[in-house]
Amino acid sequence: VGNGTTMVGLYLGFLEAYKEGYASRIPRFIAASTLHANQVVESWLQGRLTPVVVLPERVRETPVNEPLVAYRSLNAEEALRALYETKGRAYAFGDEELIEASLLLRAVEGISSLPASSSALLALREFVREEDPEGPLVAVVTGKWLRRR
């Protein structure tokens, strides 16, 4: 999760589908981001219902984590609401983990994703370790490596 926009959009879509009878339930939402540089994840990890202040001077932005850095997330309040209302979770990962997940996704599934996008796969792994959930699991991987010509 960066600004939370995609997660909030998905949550609102599922909420509407549930209210209209097209879905039997709303899935649990899991947020994944970079360490100490994302308002949504930092707020959830601190158990806060409202966004916490992430000081820009403490953020270490790199080429790997840049898509996830959001010390002031555009949709932080709505994203936190989606996490809490669905009994979701949030996880943060370092650059090395993000790179490893991206390489694994490419090797195993043939999916060429940015390391930041592969954070979804890492979060899914952690969630399964903690919860042992039943049913289908979906990881939304939104960014991909582009070949330069």
Image (spheres, grey):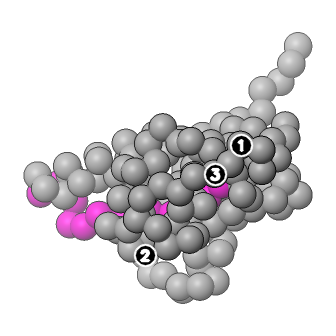
* Residue extending furthest toward the left: 20
User: Is 66 located above or below residue 105 in the figure?
Assistant: above
Label 2 and label 1: CA atoms lie apart by 39 Å
Looking at the image, tell me whether mark 2 or mark 1 is earlier in sequence order: 1
Label 2 and label 3: CA atoms lie apart by 35 Å
Residue 23 lies in the magenta-colored region: yes
Q: Position of residue 127 (x, y in %)?
A: 58, 75
- Give SS at disc 2: loop
In the image, which is nearer the foreground, mark 2 or mark 1? 1
Residue 30 left/right relative to 83 = right
Could you tell me which residue is drawn at 82 percent across and 47 percent down? 60
> Residue type at mark 3?
Val
Region in magenta: 21-33
Label 3 and label 1: CA atoms lie apart by 6 Å
Q: Residue tagged by mark 3?
A: 54
Could you tell me if the residues under marks 3 and 1 are in contact, i.e. CB atoms within 8 Å? yes
Could you tell me which residue is drawn at 59 percent across and 79 percent down? 128
- Pick the front one: 142 or 2: 2
- Give SS at disc 1: helix
Q: Residue tagged by mark 1?
A: 56
Could you tell me which residue is drawn at 78 percent across and 26 percent down? 146
Could you tell me if the residues under marks 2 and 1 are in contact, i.e. CB atoms within 8 Å? no
Looking at the image, tell me whether mark 2 or mark 3 is earlier in sequence order: 3
> Residue type at mark 1?
Pro
Q: Position of residue 42 (x, y in %)?
A: 60, 61
Q: Residue tagged by mark 2?
A: 135
Neighbor class of circle 1 (other Cα within 10 Å; few <14, some 14-19, many 20+) is few
